[in-house]
Amino acid sequence: MFVPRSLKIKRHANGDGKSCVAKIIKSDPEDLQLDKSRDAPVDALVTEAATTPDRHSSESCPFPSPGGQLAEVHSVSPEQGVKDSHPSEEPVKSFSKTQRWAESGEPVCVVCGRYGEYICDKTDEDVCSLECKAKHLLQVKEKEEKSKLSNPQKADSEPESPLNASYVYKEHPFILNLQEDQIENLKRQLGILVQGQEVTRPIIDFEHCSFPEVLNHNLKKSGYEVPTPIQMQMIPVGLLGRDILASADTGSGKTAAFLLPVIMRALFESKTPSALILTPTRELAIQIERQAKELMSGLPRMKTVLLVGGLPLPPQLYRLQQQVKVIIATPGRLLDIIKQSSVELCGIKIVVVDEDKKLFKPPVLVFVDCKLGADLLSEAVQKITGLKSISIHSEKSQIERKNILKGLLEGDYEVVVSTGVLGRGLDLISVRLVVNFDMPSSMDEYVHQVGRVGRLGQNGTAITFINNNSKRLFWDIAKRVKPTGSILPPQLLNSPYLHDQKRKEQQKDKQTQNDLVTGANLMDIIRKHDKSNSQK
Ligand code: AMP
């Protein structure tokens, strides 16, 4: 994976509103390791409250230096920052209008919506410039003052309601006091079906979870007055730290159903990152992060990172190292990152194993009808596309074949060009795309070849090239492929060979039907038989 050696990355928009801390990260894989010093015993759901100092304290903060060591970084003026830092460093943007707009998935300035290149050291929010940082701090102050005015009792106490040191989900007295049949009745009416042992009762109100006040406030602000049925059952089970397999309709509130337990767990977990949310698409990841940020707003030390494709990797890597609590990722991008440096999640190291590679990066399998064709095509693919390609056919020795198969399972090749018979030896691999470069000589072989695609529940595609060399199979192909909804070219559907074969098959069917003895034709058959006998 290509990463430039030295690059500009996200900085902290620093405390005094005039200065900033510029950071440089070296791209060597060892530098991308997460900070090992954060290791501590893995906790269950209930943990000590995080005691690590705010990483954005304006005095100093450790992060990888160009040499790969931890370095102290100090506040400097913008001009000095430019002078002293790496030549490629740019000064922190002073004004919002000099910042570009954020691309989909990039952090967004909480004030103006532009690219949130910096992190406000006071609030952990994304800001685009010193101007927006100042505006943001003003807004926060105004909000605090307003809430003090509307709640004067609170004004005398702590500025924000402090979090307890730990959290244990306990059934609320209201839920505890319900009769078993009342619970069953409620579940039946709401369509809640549960399997599993000693599954805790559903909640009826968010208040039954004893969430921190800030979280209750965020729920209300997002318009979540009462939990949806999937949330009623999933949230308490999740808060207890149990594994859940849940299914509910689209739009039924599944995201918040898993996010709320994740947030509560991450909130009381001192290690970072403490949660990983894997989603199949980048759009879904962006949507989930947006919802997570809404719900986490104002909670201490809660920070998310989005690891998705289609955006530059270095800023995502850098953000991952900023003691984020929750990772929201697509498998492809997460794999790219893990391949460079292993990611530790709650003290558990995530590494790429061969099986994952096999599942995430299935190769393209191309079938041809001769050995020379396999070699030539494989070479051409590698030269033209740059994809790692290999040919496999009977002229390769047994050892060579074994090595190729091993390489395949380890994800060494992106394209495999094989002669049909040898393709049968590739039964083990699941592929994303099968190309029948030469149509095989029988339908059985064809079915076997396209069967390599989309196994293990994955989707796949098969592309078949046909020409008049396989004209005797035209009608068979159409019969077999059409019912699957695949697109057949008009040249095939209108081919005279196809129509000829279809007509012949229909005649044959008719003949077979005529030869069958039925009540209706029985007398005819006997008469015909007598006649031919008498003629003899
Ligand atoms: P989801 O099924 O998670 O995609 O949620 C669908 C929509 O419902 C999203 O816009 C959520 O913000 C919203 N939503 C989720 N839970 C609730 C709730 N308890 N009350 C009101 N809206 C909700």
Image (tube, rainbow, N blue to C red):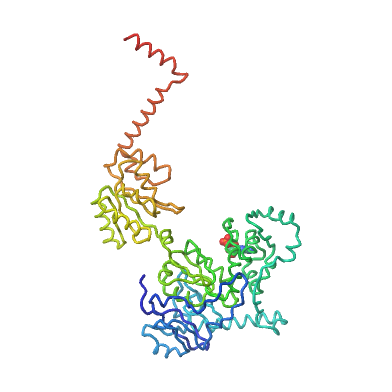
Question: Furthest-top residue in view?
Answer: 534
Residue 139 found in image quarter:
bottom right
Q: Which residue is drawn at 41% across and 62% down?
A: 354
Name the residue nearer the viewer: 290 or 527.
527
Q: Which residue is drawn at 71% across and 80% down?
A: 151
Name the residue nearer the viewer: 1 or 47.
47
Residue 402 found in image quarter:
bottom left
**Where does the image place residue 401, in percent across and percent down from the top left?**
30, 54
Question: Furthest-front residue in view?
Answer: 399
Name the image quarter holding the N terminus.
Answer: bottom left
Q: Would you say 26 lies left or right of 256 here?
A: left
Q: Which residue is drawn at 52% across and 68% down?
A: 276
- Residue 55 position (above or below residue 246): below
Name the image quarter holding the C terminus.
Answer: top left
Q: Ligand 1 is located in which of the four quadrants?
A: bottom right
**Where does the image place residue 330, in percent across and percent down from the top left?**
47, 64
**Where does the image place residue 385, in percent across and percent down from the top left?**
30, 61
Tally the numbered discs.
Answer: 0
- Residue 397 position (above or below residue 483): below
Q: Would you say 434 lies left or right of 111 here?
A: left
**Where does the image place residue 190, in percent across and percent down from the top left?**
67, 55
Q: Would you say 82 lies left or right of 122 here?
A: left
